Image (cartoon, helix red, strand yellow):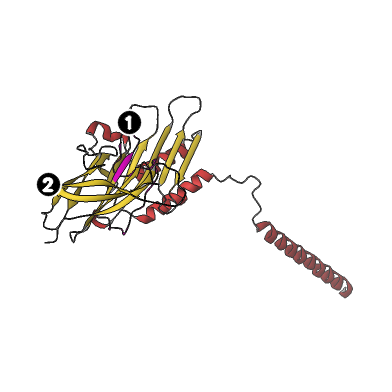
């Protein structure tokens, strides 16, 4: 009898040991199976969308309440649609538009062709969501805003592409840009404030700086015909309620080998605003003393002047 009980007890113990061993093995297998396994079909990363998100975040971190920039549409369209204009944006709404070439205000019937930077980002997001056939975007490296955007929504449909450019974005506290110590020339394919062309393919731009203490300067950028034998200075005078800037050719002698060519130049010209009442004053740029028609016109707003 005792032998039978001992055998039964031994058998039960062995069974329990086997069960516990199996449970341990089962637990080990559960632990192994719980580890994440590589996805055999990973979702591909869209590099266009990735760049969009990165630069949108960079732009949003700027948190600009106001800024201005040059906007232009590129298309086989009437000239009034493709002309570049400088847009002033306040709280994500365009509050001012002037044509680059003439500095005249854009008429109300043309203003709907211009977009804010945030609206351009919206176009990119919409094109990504619609899986457009082609999306090409260049972004500003420091501020993140799109500088060039080309979208072809459907390759089978002609003339539905979108091609726009944004450049020369500027922002300043209270809308006043600090006066720089110098200004640099730039190439003829650049746009800034106003550009005037004549038959000699010369151009001029005027970038105005004013500060609340009554200091004002203008950066004149243009080009002249022969940098080997002449240099350029720009004089300033105030006549009949407006500022007159005049290009002056200065003969030079150089012993350095030089090929005569169109030469860009830039001059930072100080305006004598002492004693002037606060207000808006025209600025005209002439290419010579005998030039009666200014090649480009702009204006300066003086908030306060020194006495």
7 left or right of 98?
Answer: right
Residue 264 seen by the camera? yes
Looking at the image, is mark 1 or mark 2 nearer the viewer? 2
Say the numbered circle drawn on residue 114: none
Where does the magenta region start and end?
Answer: 178-205
Q: Quadrant of residue 25?
A: bottom right
Residue 200 painted magenta: yes
- Which quadrant does the C terminus fall into? bottom left
Residue 77 painted magenta: no
**Prevailing secondary structure of the magenta residues:** loop
Against 37, residue 298 (above or below) is above
Residue pointed to by mark 1 = 81
Q: Quadrant of residue 160?
A: top left
12 left or right of 180?
Answer: right
Q: Residue at x 39, y 45 (%)?
A: 263
Say the numbered circle drawn on residue 241: 2
């Amino acid at each position: 009898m005792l032998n039978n009980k001992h055998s039964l007890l031994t058998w039960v113990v062995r069974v329990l040991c086997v069960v516990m061993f199996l449970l341990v093995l089962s637990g080990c297998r559960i632990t192994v199976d719980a580890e994440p396994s590589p996805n055999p079909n990973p979702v591909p990363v869209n590099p266009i969308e990735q760049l969009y998100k990165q630069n949108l975040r960079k732009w949003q971190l700027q948190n600009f309440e106001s800024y201005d920039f040059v906007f232009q549409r590129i298309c086989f369209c009437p000239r009034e649609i493709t002309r570049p204009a400088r847009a002033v944006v306040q709280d994500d709404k365009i509050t001012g538009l002037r044509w680059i070439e003439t500095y005249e205000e854009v008429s109300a019937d043309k203003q709907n062709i211009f977009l804010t930077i945030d609206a351009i980002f919206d176009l990119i997001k919409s094109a990504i969501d619609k899986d457009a056939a082609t999306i090409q975007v260049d972004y500003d490296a420091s501020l993140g805003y799109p500088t060039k955007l080309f979208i072809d929504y459907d390759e089978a449909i002609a003339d539905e592409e979108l091609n726009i450019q944004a450049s020369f974005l500027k922002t300043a506290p209270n809308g006043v840009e600090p006066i720089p110590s110098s200004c640099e020339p730039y190439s003829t394919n650049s746009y800034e404030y106003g550009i005037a062309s004549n038959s000699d393919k010369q151009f001029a731009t005027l970038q105005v700086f004013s500060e609340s203490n009554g200091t004002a300067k203008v950066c004149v950028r243009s080009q002249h015909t022969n940098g080997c034998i002449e240099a350029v200075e720009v004089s300033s005078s105030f006549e009949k309620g407006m500022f007159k800037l005049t290009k002056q050719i200065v003969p030079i002698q150089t012993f350095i080998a030089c090929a005569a060519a169109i030469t860009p130049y830039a001059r930072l010209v100080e305006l004598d605003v002492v004693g002037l009442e606060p207000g808006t004053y025209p600025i005209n740029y002439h290419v010579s003393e005998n030039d009666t028609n200014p090649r480009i016109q702009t204006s300066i707003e003086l908030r306060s002047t020194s006495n």
